[in-house]
Amino acid sequence: LDCRNKMRFAHAAAALTLFCGLGATASAFAITNVGHKDYSVGTGDRNVAQRNSVIGGNNHNGHAVAFLSRKGLATRGGELEESKMSSLSAASLSTNESTSVVSEENLSLLSERGRAALENLIQHDAAEGAQRHVYADWPEAGVDDEGKLRITEQLADLDASYPGGLPNYLSKAKMLLRESADGVNPFSDFTAVVPEGEHISYDSPVPDSHTGMTFAQAEEAGLTGIADVAFVLVAGGLGERLGYSGIKLSLETNLCTNKCYLEVYAKYILAMQRMASLKTGRNDIRIPLVIMTSGDTDPLTRKLLEDNDNFGFEDGQIQIVCQDKVAALKDGNAGLSLGKDRWDIETKPHGHGDVHHLLYREGHVDKWEKEGRNHVIFLQDTNALVINSVLPTLGVSIAKGFHMNSICIPRLAGEAAGAIARLE
């Protein structure tokens, strides 16, 4: 693998995507140790993540592959349970407080969950009034009742889909928007340093002095653990930026075989499954694949799988999790943006960092741990060449005992690409 010529990609460290409050771009590639109890932590304090994340990897060798250090996954203590809690309860909000804004007649029209979500929003907004355009000046009962039901059910959905609920999302958004407007630099106390990381070169027969392995040796080490991995494919985006109207997973990877990205990934995983069976002598090895879709890509992804008989996977071997959309904001006060009318909240896709929360929420992490799986391999939807380095990266992860591991290549000066750096 020639990392410079064949893998022109770089990405933000996966450890930081676990903590992004408004959804950052997920890792193009990462391997995560399932056994690490802080695997899925939802969203969290950005500055905590920045202080605790120690990132390794990158050098100026044209054939370098680099990885996160073993300290690359910051923890968040007990907030995992908090992220599972629904914020729909508005018990502390008195009836008088809610009916002073929305009449009891209008409140009585709503479902229990819709009313709770509305009261929760009113309580959260009591001091600021940034959301009054959502709940104030409702017409009397009997006028636009369908719209009132629609917007409160949407509020309930948004509240339930975000860790900590809609108020937590709005509070975090307002803080980030204020910091942005004030020019606050969260990295002002740090100096970015090129991290050391681990380095392997595909064309060197001599083991790296730091890593202690050649590329081939790292691949062999990876083979020892490939049977106990799970693959996750992040595929929430359309190909519009590329002038393509379909999902990116259906794009052709080349003009010779015309195989689409999803087929390439599927065939690779099945090939690894066969290799694991041959190496262990076991015929019961099944490597699972979870695909994260979005509202834009979910139907077309399912159809692509159905039309191609799941590309050879057995029934149930592929699972799909669909990421939720989040509320769009209209101003620096994090006011909710209304859509086609006053009874509709505009929503936008969240970031790829959602995948960690979804894997936890849907029970996949617990299931994999019970099955004895040790690592999760994350793939981006349109990066077919990265599969050439899955095995050596897994091998280094096993040998070094990493909890989190990311691949990167040297970044050219001025290149419009993300970068991995160590903050000191």
Image: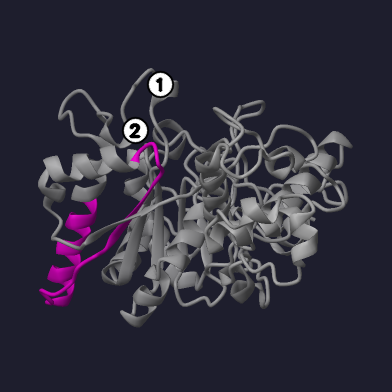
Taking the image as shown, residue 150 lies to the left or right of residue 204, namely right
Query: Residue 34, percent across and down?
Result: 44, 72
Q: Residue 105: x percent and y percent?
A: 64, 53
Q: Which residue is label 1 attached to?
A: 242
Looking at the image, which residue is at 17% across and 76% down? 280
Pinpoint residue 151: horizontal percent, then vertical percent. 56, 44
Left or right: where 168 falls relative to 259: right
Residue 143 picture quarter? top right
Which residue sits at x=38%, y=58%? 392
- The answer to whether 14 appears left or right of 22 in the picture is left
Please determine whether, in this image, residue 113 is positioned above or below residue 203: below
Q: Is residue 90 magenta?
A: no
Q: Measured along the vertical axis of the image, is residue 365 above or below residue 61?
A: below
Q: On the image, numbered disc 2 is attached to which residue?
A: 248
Whether 94 is drawn above or below 124: the answer is below
**Looking at the picture, which amino acid does disc 2 mark?**
Lys
Q: Secondary structure at mark 2?
A: helix
Asked if the residues shown at circle 1 and circle 2 are in contact, with their CB atoms under 8 angstroms apart, the answer is: yes
Type of the residue with mark 1: Leu
Measuring from the top left, give residue 230's x and y in whole percent: 33, 64
Q: Is residue 285 visible?
A: yes
- Magenta range: 268-297
Residue shown at 15% from the left, 30% from the top: 257
- Residue 47 visible, this orientation: no
